[in-house]
Amino acid sequence: MFKRVIWWSAGFGAGLGSSFWVKRAVNRRVQRYIPDDVRKAVGERARSTGSHIRTAIHEGRAAMRQYEADAEAEVEGGRPSSLRAVPD
């Protein structure tokens, strides 16, 4: 059992270390070969995408609240038409 823990830990450490090493190597190569203006454009695009996602989330939540309010108003006024019992 103890051997298994040691080898598992060694494998985990090796995998973690190699993934950090690969990430650093790729980032160094990217910074070396990509011009500054392209890097800036990609960064701005990423930030604007985040902004669009936040806006979509806020709009979706507002629509959800409106839908819930409409549904509650319909239920308080009587049963919604989709839940009414069909007469025999």
Image (spheres, grey):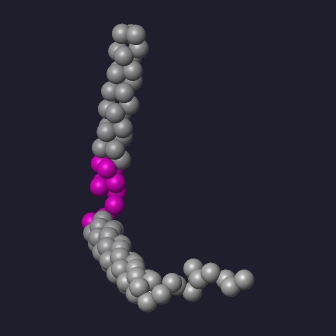
Is 34 covered by the magenta stretch?
yes
Q: Nearer the viewer, residue 84 or 49?
A: 84
Q: Residue visible at 31% across and 50% down?
A: 27
Compared to residue 22, the image places residue 42 above or below, namely below
State the quadrant of the C terminus: bottom right
Picture layout, residue 4 above or below residue 69: above
Q: Nearer the viewer, residue 22 or 14?
A: 14
In percent of width and height, residue 44 lies at: 29, 72
Q: Is residue 32 above or below residue 80?
A: above
State whether residue 63 appears in this view.
Answer: no
Q: Is residue 31 magenta?
A: yes
Residue at the image point whose x is 36% and y is 16% from the top: 5
The answer to which quarter of the image holds residue 47 is: bottom left
Magenta range is: 27-36
Q: How many marks?
A: 0
Query: Which quadrant of the figure contains the N terminus?
Result: top left
Of helix, strand and loop, which mostly describes the magenta segment?
Answer: helix
**Residue 43 % position (x, y):** 29, 67
User: In which image quadrant can residue 53 be found?
Assistant: bottom left
